[in-house]
């Protein structure tokens, strides 16, 4: 049993690490991948370029770049002739910090130490000049700029101007790749910067894959390769080690599949279980729900990761019940969950608001109107009798704080007393009824009142 528990722990660790740290496996986007690869190959040959990679978060922009670089790292000519400099708008918040990082990543700290420069452009030109050795051509530098739109907020966009200027004037072979999720990023560039940009753009959007491909991806994410398959990846891992020393993404952590080794029986049993699971109608229905909710691979990876994290020694395999429980969390309504966390008094006020809205065709209301309706119910209720007005007012104010009811006046209370300020309901009747049905230990008379509008 300890051996089985240890194997399960290894399986969990492998799957979780692959889902979290595999930054180079890219599925799809063959055309975009080819375009970026050709661009980088031409840069290694001494041609300067600039490119913007645009797409929503989680679409795979950074993964595409890492995958292309990993492919190119097996080419000795690319490794010998190219330097990778990675910048991030969240980390390098101004051009001074960015230039310091460029100096460090180009390993030119000692050369630049003590030098006095008149401008940012002179400093950058000096760094690029240092890459030249004798009559040999300069090394090509690939600048990968994550969160490119944040660099557009820097003073005068000095860094972007100088990088694009160098790429256009052929002072040194460089390639500038900006990665951003903003579709309007070109409009953020100053006129002088925009004029020096090549206007080459590659767009990445979640692929509209068929449901059959989506289920195949689910199975693939949970598939455990054999030891032989893991060893076949050794060449890719070796290239990854070269990449790790140059690309910022891999400085802290990366995924190395060769570190794992599994017993053949464990792998076979696990993969058979996943293959059997994926054919069940109930599982296909759950996956269809997820597919309709979010088609992206990043979302499915998160779902699979949460499934794997639930595995225990006494529950070594993923079950339909686990999938159903997890999938239901994506279907839940936040407002219904919020309603279920209210006190019984607050639920009664919500029901009173619902009745008022039904009777008066969604007319606005104030505290006095709702208190009068609530008081009628409280007189015949054993649960809500003798509740003080001040307590009811405080409950009403809490409903406003959590934005289940919204004030009509934009400027706040003003001269109107809070009891008379008009509000509107920010809920649907269906949400209220679902919350009443779901609310634990709700008094029967309150639940019955929710179904009636006679009081």
Image (cartoon, grey):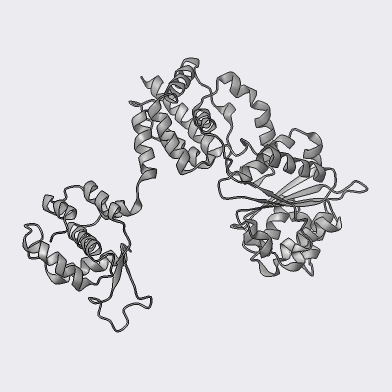
Q: Quadrant of the N terminus?
A: top left
Q: Position of residue 6 (x, y in %)?
A: 42, 24
Quarter of the rendering containing residue 338: bottom left
Q: Position of residue 80 (x, y in %)?
A: 80, 39
In this view, the residue in front, 210 or 290, is: 210
The residue positioned farthest toward the top in the image shown: 265
Q: Position of residue 92 (x, y in %)?
A: 63, 59
Residue at image point 11% right, 53% down: 445
Residue at image point 81% right, 64% down: 122
The residue positioned farthest toward the bottom in the image shown: 415
Horizontally, residue 341 falls left or right of residue 190, namely left
Quarter of the rendering containing residue 369: bottom left
Q: Quadrant of the C terminus?
A: bottom left
Question: What is the tally of numbered marks visible in this picture?
Answer: 0
Horizontally, residue 7 falls left or right of residue 67, namely left
- Is 2 rendered above or below residue 343? above
Q: Position of residue 317 (x, y in %)?
A: 39, 25
- Is 250 rendered above or below residue 396? above
In this view, the residue in front, 71 or 261, is: 71
Q: Is residue 227 visible?
A: yes
Q: Is residue 391 visible?
A: no
Quarter of the rendering containing residue 93: bottom right
Residue at image point 74% right, 36% down: 72
């Amino acid at each position: 049993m300890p051996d089985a528990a240890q194997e399960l722990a290894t399986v969990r660790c492998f799957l979780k690490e692959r889902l979290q740290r595999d930054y180079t496996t890219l599925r799809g986007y063959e055309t975009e991948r080819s375009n970026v690869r050709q661009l980088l190959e031409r840069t290694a040959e001494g041609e300067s370029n600039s490119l913007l990679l645009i797409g929503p978060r989680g679409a795979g922009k950074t993964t595409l770049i890492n995958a292309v670089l990993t492919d190119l790292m097996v080419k000795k000519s690319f490794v010998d002739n190219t330097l990778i400099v990675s910048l991030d708008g969240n980390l390098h918040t101004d051009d001074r910090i960015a230039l310091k990082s460029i100096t460090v990543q180009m390993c030119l700290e000692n050369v630049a130490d003590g030098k006095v420069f008149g401008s940012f452009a002179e400093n950058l030109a000096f760094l690029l000049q240092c890459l030249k050795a004798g009559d040999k051509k300069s090394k090509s530098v690939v600048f990968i700029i994550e969160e490119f739109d944040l660099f557009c907020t820097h003073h005068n966009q000095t860094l972007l101007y100088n990088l694009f200027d160098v790429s256009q004037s052929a002072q040194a072979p460089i390639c500038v790749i900006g990665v951003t999720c903003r579709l309007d990023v070109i409009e953020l560039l100053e006129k002088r910067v925009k004029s020096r940009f090549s206007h080459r753009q590659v767009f990445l959007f979640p692929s509209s894959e068929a449901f059959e491909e989506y289920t195949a991806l689910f199975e693939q994410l949970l598939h455990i390769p054999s030891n032989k398959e893991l060893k076949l990846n050794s060449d890719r891992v070796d290239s990854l080690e070269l990449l790790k020393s140059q690309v910022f993404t891999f400085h802290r952590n990366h995924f190395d599949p060769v570190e794992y080794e599994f017993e053949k029986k464990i792998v076979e049993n696990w993969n058979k279980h996943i293959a059997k699971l994926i054919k069940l109608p109930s599982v296909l229905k759950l996956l269809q729900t997820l597919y309709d909710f979010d088609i992206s691979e990043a979302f499915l990876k998160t779902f699979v990761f949460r499934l794997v994290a639930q595995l225990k020694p006494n529950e070594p395999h993923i079950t339909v019940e686990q999938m159903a429980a997890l999938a239901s969390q994506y279907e839940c309504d936040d407002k219904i969950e919020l309603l279920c966390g209210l006190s019984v008094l607050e639920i009664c006020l919500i029901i009173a608001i619902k009745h008022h809205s039904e009777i008066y065709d969604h007319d606005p209301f104030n505290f006095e109107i709702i208190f009068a309706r609530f008081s009628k119910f409280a007189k015949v209720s054993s649960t809500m009798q003798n509740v003080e007005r001040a307590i009811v007012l405080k409950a009403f104010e809490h409903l406003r704080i959590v934005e289940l009811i919204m004030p009509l006046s934009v400027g706040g209370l003003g001269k109107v007393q809070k009891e008379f300020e008009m509000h509107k309901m920010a809920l649907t009747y269906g949400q209220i009824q679902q919350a009443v049905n779901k609310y634990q230990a709700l008094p029967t008379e309150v639940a019955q009142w929710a179904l009636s509008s006679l009081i």
